[in-house]
Image (cartoon, rainbow, N blue to C red):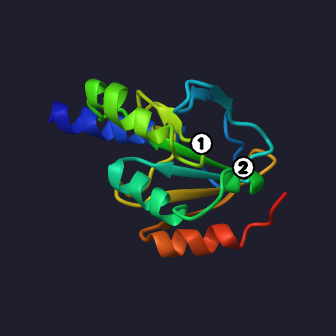
């Protein structure tokens, strides 16, 4: 009984921190794959969130033939939750490989930021922002769908 109560309270508290439509996202700062800090700001129009390697691979496939600066030109930020990645693999293999990507990958090493944006593990969450306020959200299960949505965004 106590376990059920603890689980229920934990689930309710997670919802309290979850981003809701119409709410302003709290700014955060994390490092990218080049160890450069990135702060979520009001210029961001779309926040893409991948919670695991499958989601990150989906983003990579969607951006496969795009030039450097493709996401930045559309004010899109890609947040990857890498908390479950073994530290040695991350440090010596995965993150060095990400340095060759043509786009920035903001790394959530402890999962504390991505946890605020719940969604399906195997999909990429798309959070549409307007001046820092969440206006809509959707999930993508294929690279083709994600690529199509990115292509519709205006270039700055």
Instruction: Determine the image quadrant of residue 55.
Output: bottom left
Is residue 31 positioned above or below 53 on the image? above
Residue, disc 1 = 104
Residue at image position (80%, 66%) is 154
Is residue 54 positioned above or below 11 on the image? below
Instruction: Name the quadrant of the C terminus.
Output: bottom right
Q: Which tag, 1 or 2, sits closer to the chain's start?
A: 2
Residue at image position (52%, 75%) is 145
Query: In the image, residue 153 lies at what x, y percent?
Result: 74, 67
The residue carrying pointer 1 sits among few (fewer than 14), some (14 to 19) or many (20 or more) residues within 10 Å by Cα, namely many
Element under disc 2: helix
Query: Residues at badges 1 and 2 in contact (C-beta under 8 Å)?
Result: yes
Instruction: Determine the image quadrant of residue 94.
Output: top left
Instruction: Name the quadrant of the N terminus.
Output: top left
Q: Nearer the viewer, residue 17 or 122?
A: 122
Locate residue 84 relative to residue 134 in the image: left or right. Answer: left
Residue, disc 2 = 72
């Amino acid at each position: 009984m106590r376990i059920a109560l603890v689980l229920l309270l934990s689930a309710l508290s997670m919802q309290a921190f979850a981003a809701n439509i119409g709410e302003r996202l709290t700014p955060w700062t994390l490092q990218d794959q080049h160890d450069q800090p990135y702060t979520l700001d009001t210029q961001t129009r779309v926040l893409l969130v991948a919670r695991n390697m499958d989601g990150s691979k989906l983003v990579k496939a969607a951006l496969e033939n795009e030039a450097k600066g493709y996401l930045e030109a559309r004010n899109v930020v890609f947040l990857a939750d890498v908390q479950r990645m073994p530290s040695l693999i991350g440090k010596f293999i995965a993150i060095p490989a990400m340095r060759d990507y043509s786009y920035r990958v903001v790394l959530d090493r402890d999962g504390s930021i991505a946890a605020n944006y719940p969604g399906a593990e195997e999909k990429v969450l798309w959070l549409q922002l307007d001046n820092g306020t969440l206006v809509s959200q959707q999930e993508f299960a294929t690279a083709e769908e994600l690529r199509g949505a990115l292509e519709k965004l205006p270039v700055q």
